Image: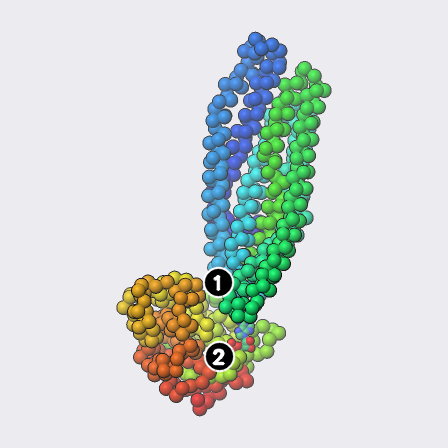
Amino acid sequence: MLRDLIRVLGLWRGRGWWLLAGMVAAVASTLAGVALLVLAGRVVGGAVAAGEAGAFALAGLGFAALLWLRPVMLFRPVARYLERLVTHEATFRALADMRVWFFARLAARLPRGIGLRQAGDLLGRLVADVESLDGLYLRVIVPAASSLAVVVAIVFVVGAADAGLAALLALPLAAALLLPLLLAPAAARAGNDVARAQGSLRNAVVDPLSGIEDTLAANAEARAGARVSAEGEALAAAQRDLARRAAWGGAAGSLLVQVALLGALGWALIAGQQGLAAGLMGVFLAIAAAEALGLMPRAGAAMAAAGAGARRLFEAADTPEPVPDPVAPAAAPAGHALRVTGLRFRWADDRPLVFDGLDLELPEGARIALLGPSGSGKSTLAALLLKLAEPEAGRITLGGVDIATLPAAELRRRVTWLTQDARLFDDTIAANLRLAAPAADDAALWSALDRAQVGEVVRALPDRLETMCGEGGLRFSGGQARRLALARTLLAPASIVILDEPAAGLDADTERAFLETLDDALGGRSVILIQHHLLGVERPTRILRLAGGRAIPAAG
Ligand SMILES: Nc1ncnc2c1ncn2[C@@H]1O[C@H](COP(=O)(O)OP(=O)(O)OP(=O)(O)O)[C@@H](O)[C@H]1O
């Protein structure tokens, strides 16, 4: 747990000054509280030492303390205000950095797929687990810094008067300060259980709701509800366990502070008139310490929760990258002839080979129709051509350069892919199209829409290009969404286009019309057209069929 939390702090390095400023403000505010009670202690101590009210002015120490009370009282609320402001700002900034870091790591690793695909779980890691890390700063580091400052201040202030009394106060208070560290490992398991239960609950909610039509069609909403209820109960049980540990920490912490208070009180009584003022000061300081150390028991549970959140984040973020970029990339190729030789690939060690010695050639401007039964590896080949997966053996070259030596971004500028289940994102049509070509003007967008046979549909919408697509393109029918996604692919400035069933979801006439106009739509680019069957209008330069892990020339 500690190693993960230290790694989190390393990732927050860029916000170091903000985090430090927050801690300084918190320590200043706490020390102002201590000063207030020291001064109050001096006033009372002075009065007690003077014996009579009339002689109070002569007790110089008490009178001087009275003068200092006002500025300290004014300073404290200001410091407290600054503490809240700065610590929260520091946290927001650090967590925002963390989210961006985690998102980038996930984006590079998700194509690997296995185990990380559940939307609810990912959402939980990106939102709740990152959020739980605020506890590391706000509920562990800041209170610990304040509490440490109090203990040190007590040692100095009381130690100047009497070393024995200082030890009597500082020892139980230091124990209370260290308590969360001692309790955190035991709470860590409970923290892990809570984080895991939160992930399961999120999945139980998100899964059936994101496929609501299927849930309702199967009459499965009651079963989905029962699963949500069971996961909710598991979460409550884990949270109860964590809360119980926090409560134990709280009880032990307040017991230790009371030991300090009773110690000071006992010392004052035993020391008699001589040590009464120092003893009273000790009592006041124990009260001041109670305020700062009172936050520490929560720190154990917060540390456990942050540790569990950090573990889940790093677990996802450290999944090996499917295809890391080369350390010393080759120069970008001039041409874009594609050649695959002896390709061998399987998705995981325990999965069967998808390709075993596959050869394929796509000269510049050529069009290959790639056929094959479901599961024969058509989409897998596209994933390999875009470096979303890495071959076990064999070579893929682009313009004569092995793509293993090219950075993925460079390759994806030259090769684009309309996936089988291409998605529209919850934004306008224009923004969805510009994902592939950020600089494209409206005329280019309309041209792509027309080439994808969907221009008329968009022209009929009141907001035209500014129409919102809805989450996953829900605003459109399956066929319309597919053609919008196709328009996006056509806009990409790539010289090789892989179209995975581009006409799926289109009625027979539109499908035929689209495939007949493929030449115009693609304007001389190289194409790999993945189809289950050919209509006879595609005019490919070659037809290949995937079978037994190889590409075999076919008659169509
Ligand atoms: N991300 C993945 N992780 C693990 N296995 C995968 C993954 N993607 C595909 N596979 C497996 O690889 C094999 C080839 O799948 P692929 O999707 O490439 O076939 P396909 O020819 O495109 O099929 P379809 O016509 O149904 O789309 C299948 O056995 C499939 O289960």
Which residue occupies the extreme right position in the image? 270
Residue type at tag 1: Ala
* Residue 550 shown left or right of residue 236 in the figure: left
Decide: marks 2, 1 in contact (CB < 8 A)?
no
Residue 428 in sight from this viewpoint: yes
Q: Residue at x 46, y 66 (%)?
A: 328
The residue singled out by tag 1 in the image is: 107
Q: Percent position (x, y) of residue 470?
A: 41, 63
Res 464 → quadrant = bottom left
Quadrant for the C terminus, please.
Answer: bottom left
Give the structural element (helix, strand or loop) at label 1: helix
Against 30, residue 134 (above or below) is below
Q: Is residue 63 left or right of residue 500?
A: right
Res. 378 mark = 2
Structural distance between the alpha carbons of marks 2 and 1 = 23 Å
Residue at 50% from the left image edge and 61% from the top image edge: 106
For the residue carrying disc 2, how many other residues have a C-alpha within 10 Å: few (<14), some (14-19), or many (20+)? many
Question: What type is the residue that disc 2 sits on?
Answer: Lys
Identify the residue at image location x=62%, y=11%. 51
- Nearest the viewer among 207 and 43 is 207
Q: Residue at x 40, y 66 (%)?
A: 475
The residue nearer to you, when weighing 452 against 185, is 452
Report helix, strand or loop for mark 2: helix
Q: Position of residue 217 (x, y in %)?
A: 53, 70
Q: Answer yes or no: disc 2 within 8 Å of ligand 1.
A: yes
Looking at this rendering, what residue extends furthest in the top direction? 54
Q: Which mark is residue 2?
A: none
Q: Is residue 181 visible?
A: no
Q: Residues within 10 Å of mark 1 (few under 14, many from 20)?
A: few
Task: Give residue 187's position: percent from left, percent from top.
Answer: 66, 48
Q: Position of residue 209 (x, y in %)?
A: 52, 63
- Residue 61 higher or lower than 158, as above or below: above
